[in-house]
Amino acid sequence: MWKNKNWSRFRGDEYAVLFYRIGLAFVMYQVCRLFFYIYNADLIEVNGISEYFHLAYHGLAFDTTAILYLNGLFIVLAILPLPQTRTLTFQKALKVLYFVTNGVGLALNCIDLIYYRFNFGRSTSAITDSIAHESNKLLLFANFALNYWHVFLLFIVLLLAWIKAYSLFRPQFDKLRFTLAYFVFSLLAMLVIVTLAIGGIRGDFKKSTRPINLVDANRYVRVSSQADIVLNTPFSVFRTLFSNNFKKVNFVSEGEIDSLVKPYKQYRNNPKTRPNIVILILESNGKEYFGSFNKEMGIKNHISYTPFVDSLAQHSRIYTNAYANGYKSIHAMSSVLAGIPSFKDAFTSSPYPKQPTESLVSVLESLGYNTSFFHGAPNGSMGFLGYGNILGFDAYYGKNEYNNDADFDGVWGIWDEPFFQYFNKTISQFKQPFFTTLFSVSSHEPYKVPEKYEGKFPKGNVKMHQCMGYTDYALKQFFAQAKKQAWFENTIFVLVGDHGNTIFYDEYKKEANKNAVALLFYAPKYNLKGADNRWAQQIDIYPTLLDLIGYDKPFRSWGRSLLSDNEISPFVIRYSSNNYMLFADGYICIFDGRKAVGFYKDTDRGLTQNLIAQRNATMNQIERRCKALIQDYMQRIMDRKLGGIGQNSMN
């Protein structure tokens, strides 16, 4: 507490206390950044203390923006040109406001200590999408606090320490006489502080530059994953809040889109057939958990947790370089069923999903298929029911239809084994041909298995491994019963992971290997055998199935048939660490939304040697292909042209 009356008269003590309290926020953000790295050091390559401090230093600009966003009202109230700001009541109210807003920021930073291991990126405003449709939000929160008690405890300790430090310095609690000099000085000081705050929120005062955004963190890094150390979670949330990253671009001509992307496909490779089609989208089934998908990876002492799928793979066509086209469950639904990937923003959470959309659902319904979607969670969870209605499924089967809470796992939904059996019994009553999709539940945090199966499956090296064993067992039981059904032999089965999960092997910690997933086609009546190590992705499933059943009409798709060699070369398009990534023709291209910023050999999955200084014609063509794909993606979605040829868009 300051005793100098002149210092107090010109509010020097108040401004000093204000800067001290804002400074505390900067200290806390650096503490959170350090814990973020400690928790995720195995996923982010940092060469020594000096490189860490380099990243932390550049993080100050992003911390400044986040802190000023959260403390804007606090700062304005603290510097109002009123002598009442020095009263005890006013100061107590300021303290409450300060810790309500900064407590939210601290919580967001703490959540990403864990969530980053599943998301592989700082959380954005889309974090609300993951729980917006959940009816058991309190249960999910309680489960998180219980399973990650150490993070919850860390949050409490940091918050209490922050509260203690806040009160170490405070202005004098007295009421000064309101004079013209006091008002003028306060007003000038207020203008200076507000001006500084505006510059801090923007990132600088230059008129020629836009406010800093997530992508700017990549300016200071050696490898792209380091950008997540530079960033903080409140910044990522605020910079994406109310933002719509769907923006039209004009990189190439329409003719180049037709040649580089080929958005409309037409196949005449196979005879027309009408098999049943069953797609099993498996929660968190990253490629690393499967022995059958890792034979060529060179991972020493690799352990498989999926004995059934590995046995099924011997009679299937498997794709050993397949990737998710998003990083959340809802992303997989649009990618697999409609061939629509998600990049920075989820397509399904954008303003544009509610439009006529040509998809597996619409095409197969036009051929007389019965269509359905199954998910054992409460109806509407993950947004599946809403998007399923847009696609036009004939029926949706969730926890409500299952109607037996005795098999509820207590958090997410019905355990996989009983729900898979319910799935089998239900579809066995359908008229053929049918198209159905099941989205599994159990291979997910909090990584539990039914009590009766405790000890049955290997615990492995991370908690996810036991869950993989359980879901694999549930699949085994499903196939054992499905084989007894009349429809089984005339069915194409597709198994695909929605995204990755907890990583154990170093090979999958490499940036270009994150969210590699299992992809398998099994069809008793079709000659689908062997392993294909070319690029594959979720959006390829849609055209592959239509090619396989002999659908000969033109249809819209950004993917390619995995069975055809007569179209665009194999590729993968995805979004990671605030950049697009296009894998094609021997290279991995990193594209920042405007231009290519990196080229790597496709064997350099850790992205260690940027070859952009050695650009060649192939690299130039890959960049053009990436631009063409993004341009067509944005235009078709925003202009509501996701329907088939001749379909009208929704107004």
Image (cartoon, rainbow, N blue to C red):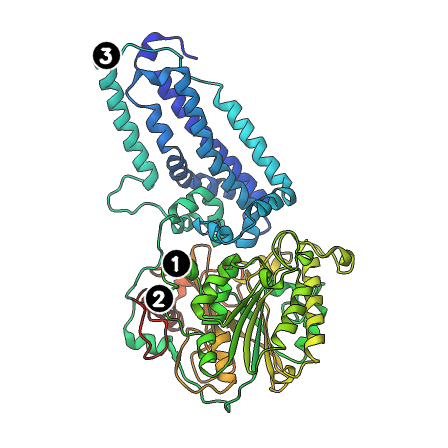
Residue type pointed to by label 2: Ile
Q: CA distance from mark 1 to mark 3?
A: 53 Å
| 101 and 1: which is toward the camera | 101
Residue 326 place in picture, x, y as percent: 48, 62
Residue type pointed to by label 1: Ser
Of the two numbered discs 3 and 2 on the same chain, state the one appearing first in sequence: 3
Q: CA distance from mark 2 to mark 1?
A: 10 Å
Instruction: Give the quadrant of residue 487.
Output: bottom right
Q: Secondary structure at mark 3?
A: loop
Q: Is residue 543 above or below residue 3?
A: below
Q: Which mark is residue 569?
A: none
Mark 1 in CB contact with mark 3 (< 8 angstroms): no
Q: CA distance from mark 3 to mark 2?
A: 60 Å
State the residue at coordinates (41%, 39%). Answer: 66
Residue 114 place in picture, x, y as percent: 58, 47
Q: On the rendered image, what quadrant is the C terminus found in?
A: bottom left
Say whether residue 603 is visible.
yes
Mark 2 in CB contact with mark 1 (< 8 angstroms): yes
State the residue at coordinates (45%, 49%). Answer: 124
| Residue that badge 2 annotates | 637
| Residue that badge 1 annotates | 350
Say whether residue 300 is visible.
no
Q: On the rendered image, what quadrant is the N terminus found in?
A: top left
| Residue that badge 3 annotates | 179
State the residue at coordinates (51%, 85%). Answer: 549
